[in-house]
Image: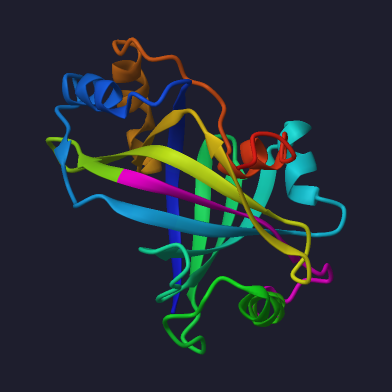
Amino acid sequence: MLENIHRYERKWVYRNKDYLQLINSLLRSNFFFRYQFQSRKVNSIYFDDNKFSSIIENLDGINNKKKIRVRWYGLTNVIVNPVIEIKTKRGFQNEKKIISLKSFKNNNSLDYKFLKNLTQKVNEVIKSKKFYFPILSTHYNREYFISNNFNIRATVDHDLESVFIKNESEFSMKKKFLSECILELKYSTHLDEIVRLNLKQMTLRLSKNSKYINSFFNKNFFYV
């Protein structure tokens, strides 16, 4: 399965764990959000080349950026229905390709053997001249919301943690916990003007955020 998604994504970062306060602010906004789906655990493994090109593109402010990750939902160590997501970003506009990994059986464990097979499969699928390695994984709980007119989606991520992976042969289950919550709005590109007008009425400060970048830096700190 190959799916293309074009949309804008705008994010806010909250430097505390009070996600209920963040949700309350969201529900009171002019977008008239309401709960859309049941919350669930989101798990991702991020891939990069040996020069860490994705990180450098982000830090250098390059307009055209690309991230490669494998994502699944539910338990962290029980991998069910994983997909490859290739995200290309130009400013706030995002294009995301989703490729199902049907060849992988369900209920895989997040261990060395799985990472080795996954690395081979990811490189076969993306067909790049570069070779991509698993760098780290992120895991968090996500709450889902939808605007009153069904045109704008919002998510609130909380209880974030990451696992640093030097390479597939040196996998570590040491975790770093991130004390922040993240609000993200997702909507079609043609709605950008009206969304930007309404954003000015919200008392939330737009802040640059990348779970991959934030997890990568300070990777040697706050381990438990």
Instruction: Report whether 56 appears left or right of 194.
Output: right
Q: Is residue 122 above or below residue 178?
A: below
Instruction: Report whether 165 appears left or right of 68.
Output: right
Image quarter (top left, top right, bottom left or bottom right) of the C terminus: top right
Magenta span has 131?
Answer: yes
Return the x and y of residue 57 as percentages of the image width and height: 76, 41
Return the x and y of residue 129 as percentages of the image width and height: 84, 71
Furthest residue toward right:
51
Q: Quadrant of residue 220?
A: top right
Image quarter (top left, top right, bottom left or bottom right) of the N terminus: bottom left
Q: How many marks?
A: 0
* Residue visible at 71% across and 40% down in the picture: 219
* Residue visible at 52% across and 53% down in the picture: 95
Q: Quadrant of residue 148?
A: top left
Q: Quadrant of residue 115?
A: bottom right
Q: Is residue 196 above or below residue 82?
A: above
Q: Which residues are magenta?
A: 124-142
* Residue visible at 25% across and 50% down in the picture: 39
Q: Is residue 12 above or below residue 167?
A: above
Instruction: Report whether 83 appears left or right of 126.
Output: left
The colour scheme of the drawn protein is rainbow
Return the x and y of residue 22 as percentages of the image width and height: 30, 23
Nearer-the-camera pick, 210 or 221:
221
Magenta span has 97?
Answer: no
Furthest residue toward front:
224
Nearer-the-camera pick, 165 or 144:
165
Q: Is residue 170 above or below residue 135?
A: below
Return the x and y of residue 107 as percentages of the image width and height: 42, 80
* Residue visible at 67% across and 73% down in the picture: 126
Instruction: Report whether 150 appears left or right of 17.
Output: left
